[in-house]
Amino acid sequence: MIYLKSNILKPQRVLMGLFILLCFAASYGSAGQDTVIRQVMIETRFIETSQSMMMKIGMAPGVHLDEVFVKLPKKNLMQASSGFLPEGWDLNPEDNLLRIFGPKIEAPLHLRVDLGDSKPPKKVDIEVLLENQRLFYKKSIKVNERPALRVSNVLDDVLAFPPIVSPGDTIEFKPLDPKKTPIEGSWTVAGEIALRALEKNCWSVTLPKILTEETSFPLSYTDPYGLTLYEVDSLPDLQIFPPLIENRPFITGITKMAFPGDPICVCGIFPDITSRYGLNLNDQPMLQPVSSSSHVVVLNLPYEINPGTQFIGGNPDTGFYKENQLSFNVVQVNGSIDQNVLMRGQSTPLHLWLEGTDEIVQIEITNNTPGIISLEGGNQQLIATSGGEENKIERMVKGLKRGDFDISYQLELDFCPCEAISGPSDIAPITPDTYIGPKKVDDLLPKWKGTGDIAGVAEDLLNNHGKEFRWSNEGNPTGIATVDDMMNTRILSCFEFVDYCAWIAGPQETLRLGGSPKVSFNKASIITEGTQQKWDGVTPIPRGKIVCGWGQPPYDDRGAMQRTRGNYTHVAISLGNGYVISNSLGNNISIQRIEECFPPDEYTEVQFGDYNWKAQQMTEDPSKVKKK
């Protein structure tokens, strides 16, 4: 029969599973007492220059032990030494028994005893105790002998590491086969020990802050017995991108084509774990990522997904805006061949056809059983499909001898089509032409016109359009000349955002002085002169007041404080309840307590006062004008 396999990751041969479980149950005490020993596993294998015996003792949750006795042949006992024991534990031969003991510890317990060049035992007796009370005893437990340890430098079938990372990045990754890398072991990445998250069955690690393309990036896995099973000096396809400045989740790219069940790479901005777990497939939540960094999230597609165009987007509850979606194609390869002709040793065509796309696709085909069949064009070849509705491939296959044959295939494409993103300027502006939300900002104009309620406008923008706006000191939208220009603006500094809210709450008329809406990066005129007051750090600031803080002042060459205001400022709008709303670095439009927005150790002075309506070419608050 024909086996048609799909795999974006390169096929690799990896070390077989290490252990076969020997499970023994034993109950002691009154009837109905829970079994305390869940499993005992024993095996030996040759490691470097000596034999080692590995033992795992699994117990019911919360059960402890402090002593293990193992009956061994005399030659094993004479050469026994500590290979890998828990901290504070030791071993000591006593008569014909090996005593392994130490501080009370909760199972599972992993022990490794080196046996030198002595022949490994076939069977052993084991007794487990806690404070001299027997928990388990079993005679003649079979010991399984395993092949000598060979450290593998192949990780493709073991781990899907995120292909793009940054210095200082916190990443997550999930082993592809937990049997090959048990969760009780440990991963080391670029010299940092990964932390295990049992509830998600994954690992996380924060990378060094000094990391370049030339930096060594070793990665290894050590099993629960202290044995290194997988080790690479570097990851050949890993890319190092600069750390992100932008912190709003955003999807910028995606694997263009994949088979059902295969991994896909989603490129973009994923500043935290919440955003990495917030991706949707066709508006339905995706499963846990296989791996992730601040630049990419690798996800496995479900096997039951249908061929055709699919969409990846972000859940708005995790920071994405709803319309940030990208499409990709799921494709499926179907095949047919006349096996009766092959069994007679004759040639017959292999027909393959692609579902899910009519594009011409490059597919790498490999004959994994060259002793059973021969494949026209060679045992490994890159073939382009025909394109169009049928989108097919044909190759002649000849049977050489009876037997199952195996032909595998994989897509030849850029798995992770990502580009480095350093800041807001790298992302296309979000405008009414590219954003179709529940309503456009234009709809706020009649609602707030002439009210003068700057705080109300700011809250409305946050609640309905907050994910569209981004903070940047490079916003400075001096090119605004029309109402449309104003409505298309989404990148603003903190000062510009206050002016933006004020314009919506103002008269919105085409005024004198050129007739353009006023949004400026103007620290001096944001508060009406004569209305400013110094905040005492305690009293709530009235709603609608503009709050401005000055950062720590600079120092001269002698270390003396200069008699000038600080070299940075921030501005916000008071909500009247001890909170302010602002467009700020790291948060974009957000609500904070006043003291959180203006920390006293960062701001030497905080003032508040009335908005300077002259900035909007008004002589006074439009709400007061309306009441007259």
Image: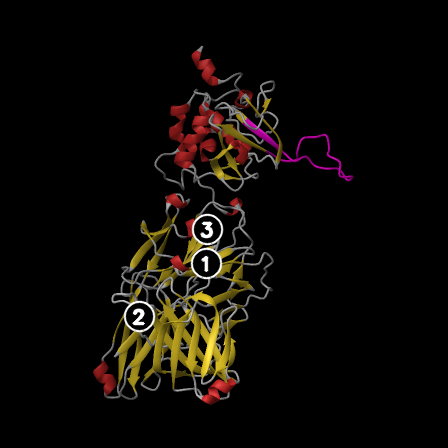
For residue 172, the mark is 1
Tag 1: amino acid = Glu
Task: Measure the alpha-carbon separation of dots 3 and 1.
Answer: 12 Å
Please say if 89 is above or below 588: below
Q: Residue at left 27%, top 61%? A: 304
Cβ atoms under marks 2 and 3 closer than 8 Å: no
Seen from the viewer's position, the closer of residues 229 and 530 is 229
Seen from the viewer's position, the closer of residues 540 and 533 is 540
Please say if 522 is above or below 185: above
Seen from the viewer's position, the closer of residues 61 and 398 is 61
Question: Which residue is the site of mark 3?
Answer: 270
Answer yes or no: is residue 436 visible.
Answer: yes
Tag 3: amino acid = Phe
Query: How many residues crowd mark 2 within 10 Å: few (<14), some (14–19), many (20+)?
Result: few
Question: Which residue is the site of mark 2?
Answer: 28
SS type, badge 1: strand
The mark that comes first in sequence, 3 or 1, is: 1
Q: Which residues are magenta?
A: 547-569
Q: Residue at left 43%, top 28%? A: 457
**Image coordinates for residue 170, horizontal then vertical, percent:** 50, 55
Tag 2: amino acid = Tyr
